Amino acid sequence: MQKNRLVGLAKSSVVFLTLPILLLAFSVGPDPRHTGAPGDQTCARSGCHTGTAVNGGGGRVELQLPGGLTYVPGQKQRIAVVITDGNATTRNYGFQATARLGSNEANGQAGTFSLVGRDIILCVDGRERTGASCPSTAALEFISHGDASNRTGRFEFDWTPPSTDVGPVKIYVAGNAANGNGAASGDRIYTTNVTLTPAASGGNRPVITSNGGVVNGASFAPGIVAGAWTTLFGSNLAAALKTWDGLIDAQGNFPTAIDGVRVTIDGLPAFINFISANQINVQAPALTRTGMVPVVVTTPGGTSETVMANVVRESPGLFLFTQSPVRYPAAVRATDGRFIAPAGLFPGLTTEPAKPGDIVLLFGTGFGPTTPAVTPGRVFSGAAPLADLSALQVRIGGMSVTPSFAGLSGSGLYQFNVTVPNLPDGNHRIEMLVNGQQIQTDVQLPVRR
């Protein structure tokens, strides 16, 4: 994250799907045409699944679409279906999805599905059903759960839209929250649909750097932490350099778009602080899982290819005044607000080294959970200590230091109040680890007695 972005911090879809059923009655997937689309049924009927009316069970099914409500002709996308249901009897989940042309929702197939995990593809050309791929003669294609083992309510699969602009595409999805009793009774069916339109075409489509393009906003180390400041590198990411100035609303909510530039992480909108042609700074949303997730940038010029990035519990980094030739942290003396750095580091700005005994404030991101938890995407002013202070280790010049405060003081912004040990003049290395994960190497605190 650029250093001038820190000052501001311190101051303050695509096409398709229907998913229905997962139950022992259909442990290898439901028959086609149970998505709730025109011409289809749902499984909330006798002989299939009975329990409540469609969407009457208190839960829901949703589609997480990396491109938002747009698609790029011929560009494959990783889609997630998420079924939520708070009933204590729920044991299994299932789904079925379909993608239809807006001009022919009953019989107009839009694009093709690809398998991920144990999903199966169902084909309809009058009577054919297969579990591999659909022949070119098939009128419609569906994708469904493949067995009854899903306990999470989350399914992922790939969808490739038509190779040309076919106008709006509608995605239908049905999901089943089943009680696993081996019968058709007591299950809950949920449906939804979305309409996708073609993204703008042309040579200005954004590109996320495939290796090292999604990193911690302070350390630039690979990885994403829920609620942490995150930087994306690439090309064609924005037409001009702009910040969120004037875009935080009266309720303190951060923007999810600047000049039509949007970022999704695991299908959820990120909160945008800064955009430029080659860099975007965002606060990651409240991600609920770890592991590889899709990241997508959408601009008026189109939608990027999906880049997979690793979500982890902690990936700590300190914000810096300088990266080279020495990494000086963005540090402030607690008593007078003076910036801690070598004298004259910035023209026109007074800076001075720390003294032994000074209480110095350090700032970072990605240090993990706090108590209380702080919801990302809105202004936060207060103190939320790290949930597990025993997991944090701090050393300055090789000497252990116990911060008097360690936690969030702003949205996504961690603050550490440390007392400078009795060290000789010179630069002294700052080491910080949380649960064994360390900040960037060779961060140096200048000290002058």
Image (cartoon, rainbow, N blue to C red):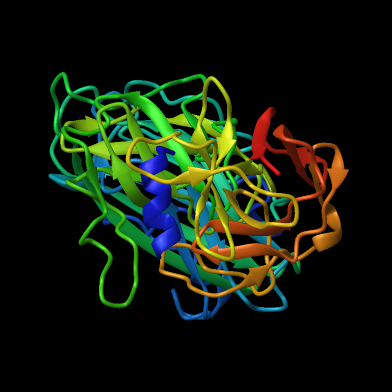
In the figure, residue 295 lies in which quadrant? top left
The relative height of residue 207 versus residue 406 in the rendered view (above or below) is above
Q: Nearer the viewer, residue 41 or 382?
A: 382
The relative height of residue 132 versus residue 145 in the rendered view (above or below) is above
The relative height of residue 83 versus residue 32 in the rendered view (above or below) is below
Residue 130 in view:
no
Q: Nearer the viewer, residue 399 or 60?
A: 399
Image point (48%, 55%), residue name:
285
Looking at the rendered image, the quarter that the C terminus falls into is top right
Image point (23%, 22%), residue name:
163
Residue 36 in view:
yes
Q: Position of residue 12 (x, y in %)?
A: 40, 65
Q: Position of residue 117 (x, y in %)?
A: 63, 35
In the figure, residue 445 lies in which quadrant? top right
Image point (80%, 41%), residue name:
423
Q: Position of residue 100 (x, y in %)?
A: 26, 44
Q: Position of residue 8 (x, y in %)?
A: 36, 55
